[in-house]
Image (spheres, rainbow, N blue to C red):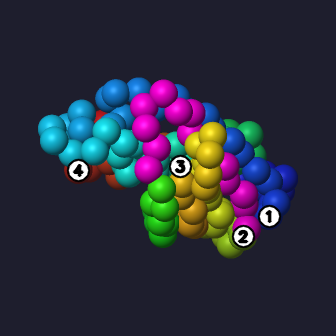
Amino acid sequence: MKKTLVPGIEGRYAMRVVSEHLVSFRKPGTPAVLATPWLLHAMEMAAYEAILTHFDQGEASEGVGFQFEHLAPTPAGETIVASARITAVEGQRITLDIEARDSRELVARGTHVRAVIDRERFKKRLEKKGGG
């Protein structure tokens, strides 16, 4: 991990909400609003964008923790803009404040923790489990 990975760095990710992102896509009869897993995906992508250029060769990161609130509904056609800001770098763990907004309001906020991993060592660990 490069020394440039420090608190204050920010990342953004935008996602247009389409029918496949709606709760009603998988659960007929439910509201046609953005499903929480897709909202979480957008915020995780913002975190990934914040740290991506700060890895040494052979490194990557994996999400290891989330705490967030889904505060407001978002319909299809809206664009979610997620942002993440690094608040702490402690060894291999990176903590970020995350949030997402649609064109009208804040729709989610929370924190996310990512761990910097060695890709080769991670791959070997996965292969031991039969993945790969």
Label 4 vs label 2: CA separation?
Answer: 32 Å
x%, y% of residue 74?
46, 44
Label 1 sits on a secondary structure element that is: loop
Instruction: Give, as a three-letter code, the residue at label 2.
Output: Ala
x%, y% of residue 6?
81, 61
Instruction: Give, as a three-letter code, the residue at label 1.
Output: Pro
| Residue at horizontal 15 percent and vertical 38 percent from the top | 28
Label 4 vs label 3: CA separation?
Answer: 25 Å
- Per the rendered image, the range of residues in magenta is 73-87
Do tag 1 and tag 2 residues touch (Cβ < 8 Å)?
Answer: yes
Do tag 3 and tag 2 residues touch (Cβ < 8 Å)?
Answer: no
Question: Extreme left residue here?
Answer: 28
Instruction: Give, as a three-letter code, the residue at label 4.
Output: Lys
Give the left or right position of residue 6, taking residue 100 as reference: right
Q: Which residue is mark 3?
A: 44
Label 3 vs label 1: CA separation?
Answer: 17 Å
Q: Which residue is mark 2?
A: 88
x%, y% of residue 75?
43, 38
Marks 4 and 2, the one that precedes in the sequence:
2
Marks 4 and 1, the one that precedes in the sequence:
1
Q: Nearer the viewer, residue 82 or 62?
A: 82
| Residue at horizontal 76 percent and vertical 50 percent from the top | 10
Which numbered circle lies on residue 7?
1
Instruction: Give, as a three-letter code, the residue at label 3.
Output: Glu
Q: Which residue is mark 4?
A: 129
